[in-house]
Amino acid sequence: MEYYKQKLTEYKKRNGEPLTQKSQDQYYRTIKGLVEKNGYDWRIEKLKEHLKSFETPTQLSYVNAIINYLTIMNYIEPQISPYKKYKKELEVIKESKPIVNPKKENNLAEWSEILEWKNKVSEINKSKSNPQYNELMLEVLLHLYTTYPRRNEIADLQFTERDPKNPISDNNKNELIYIDPVGEPDEFILKFVDYKTDGTYGTQIYHTGYNTDLTNLLKAFISKNNFKEQLFNSPKDMDKPLTRLNLTKMLQRSSKKHIGKSVSTDRIRKAYAGQNKEAIAKIENTANMLSHSVGTNMKHYNVKK
């Protein structure tokens, strides 16, 4: 187990980043507990029998940890694939179950409230001659999330300028790419390669368009940000990137202040898909934007009449 623990600290994800300390600790505890109870006999049928008394999310945690262990310990793909197949089975079961705690339903923000929240933040910033960095950053984030309802990978965006003729690179970074063709309108391109379901949906590209509110807002923000490579930075320390956790906390604090409800990126995604009727009219595009199949989108994000 100590060798595995050491390998966890050395492991690099596809984007070249190491696992967070929290992930390392969680994987290690899960595998250690499994070994203490079952040894290293992880045959699928025996594993299913061992895990059947647990809730589906807990079963997924165990299977994810096993896949991590086998990957880090250099097992070959045929040895890992049965666990990946089992993981997909569990994900289907998880998706088929209710995803909202009934006790929390009264606190769920509607799509109209999310737009109201975005508009309030924009109006406050317009009333100021020079909004502070964190104020402008919040406005940019809300415009991004209500246009492209991604997960928290938006926090990882890197800013870069590229040749209009060849704007998309092969690197493994989530990027905001600035394009300024000579004699033509400029725009931004969003590129996502590192996100929860990237193994299924691959690289995703979005164009902001010319002279849109979002394009103009992004121009103002990157100038405010001194054209730094890291697009979003901590308001308390501009030399440190904004973490995914701090992004969530920022959104929740702001939404609680402006609409009286604590809103996460996950809630924005669900409201976008379930209550934004313009998005539902473009259901296939919406499902792709959410990195879901159309079937999943239709089944779990129903329009409210």
Image (tube, rainbow, N blue to C red):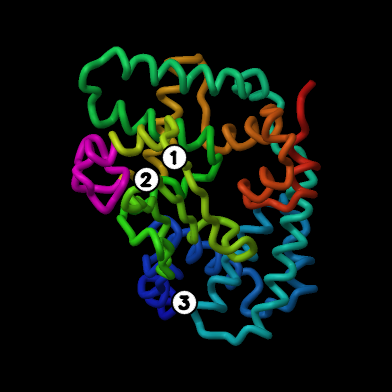
> In front here: 202 or 182?
182
Mark number, residue 1:
3
Q: Which of the two residues, 138 or 66, is positioned nearer the viewer here? A: 138
Q: Amino acid at mark 1?
A: Tyr
Circle 2 sits on which residue?
186
Residue tagged by mark 1?
A: 210
Residue drawn at x 64%, y 30% is 271
Residue 252 sits in quarter:
top left
How crowded pointer 3 is (Cα within 10 Å; few <14, some 14-19, many 20+) is rated as few
Q: Is 28 located above or below residue 235 in the figure?
A: below
Report, in whole angstroms, how far the alpha carbon at label 1 lies from the one at label 2: 6 Å
Q: Earlier in the sequence, mark 3 or mark 2?
A: 3
Marks 3 and 2 close (CB-CB < 8 Å):
no
Question: What are the residue bounds of the magenta stretch?
Answer: 221-241
Q: Quadrant of the C terminus?
A: top right
In what element is the residue under mark 2?
A: loop
Q: Position of residue 223 (x, y in %)?
A: 23, 39
Q: Is residue 212 above or below residue 90?
A: above
Question: Dot 1: few (<14), some (14–19), or many (≥20) neighbours within 10 Å?
Answer: some
Mark 3 belongs to which amino acid?
Met
Left or right: 218, with 300 as reference point: left
Q: Is residue 31 above or below residue 259?
A: below
Q: Say few, some or many: other residues with alpha carbon within 10 Å of mark 2 (under 14 / 14 to 19 / 20 or more).
A: some
The answer to the question of whether label 3 and label 1 lie on touching residues, with beta carbons closer than 8 A, is no
Q: CA distance from mark 3 to mark 1?
A: 55 Å
Most foreground residue, 4 or 151: 151
Examine the structure image and report whether residue 239 is included in the region drawn in magenta: yes
Residue 296 visible in rendering = yes
Residues at discs 1 and 2 in contact (Cβ within 8 Å): yes
Relative to 134, residue 45 above or below: below
